[in-house]
Amino acid sequence: MLVTSPCGRYALLGRKANWPRGRYSTLAGFAEVGETLEECCVREVREESGVAVDPGTVRFVASQPWPFPRSLMVGFRATAAAAAEVPAAALPEVRINEDEMEDVRWFRRDFVARRLGGGSTALTFEPSDEEAEFHIPGKASLARILITEWALEGEAK
């Protein structure tokens, strides 16, 4: 799930403690019984980051087979809900669920766009010095597709 800020210039990315240093990815989770995929996206983002998603902005992008645990990875994009009491340019506050994530934060589009090279999906990946600060998952990852698509949208404008 790639969540962008209300202004569209930032993406909410997170990392798990067992990932290689510097790897940030989209947020993810599993659907509960009786829950739509869109409801799952809204709930998982709130649970992992404390950020509210505008449910009307959740849209399907792509899917990918995922061999473990015999699952289908489904990629969505959405926009964070703007808080009424803060200026529109302000980023929604992140409150990390430390039981699930080591870090979650907002990244600027231009920062991410400059760092689209490299990365890997392997947990044994040894990042370069630059990648140890920030990199996205490897080319086999649906998260990479979502992040790259968003990051390159800015180049067309």
Image: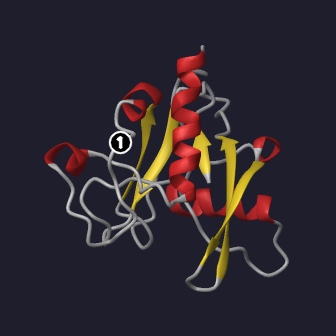
Specify the farthest residue to the bottom.
Answer: 69
- The reply to whether residue 94 is visible in this rendering is no
Above or below 33: residue 121: above
Q: How many marks?
A: 1
Q: Residues within 10 Å of mark 1 (few under 14, many from 20)?
A: some
The kind of residue tagged 1 is Gly
Q: Position of residue 133 (x, y in %)?
A: 23, 46
Question: Image point 46% across, 55% down: which residue?
Answer: 139
Protein image colouring: secondary structure
Asked whether residue 76 is in view, the answer is yes
Please provide percent x and percent y for residue 36. Answer: 83, 67
Q: Which residue is mark 1?
A: 117
Residue drawn at 60 percent across, 28 percent down:
8
x, y percent for residue 68: 55, 83
Q: Nearer the viewer, residue 113 or 88?
A: 113
Q: Residue 151: percent from the left, percent from the top?
A: 51, 33
> Split into 4 quadrants, where in the image is the N terminus?
bottom right
65 displayed left or right of 148: right
Picture residue at 36% right of the left edge, 59% below the top: 120
Q: Residue furthest top?
A: 157
Left or right: residue 64 versus residue 103 is right
Image-quadrant location for residue 32? bottom right
User: Tag 1's secondary structure?
Assistant: loop
Report the residue at 29% width, 46% height from top.
134
Name the quarter where the C terminus is drawn.
top right
User: Is 16 located above or below residue 91 in the figure?
Assistant: below
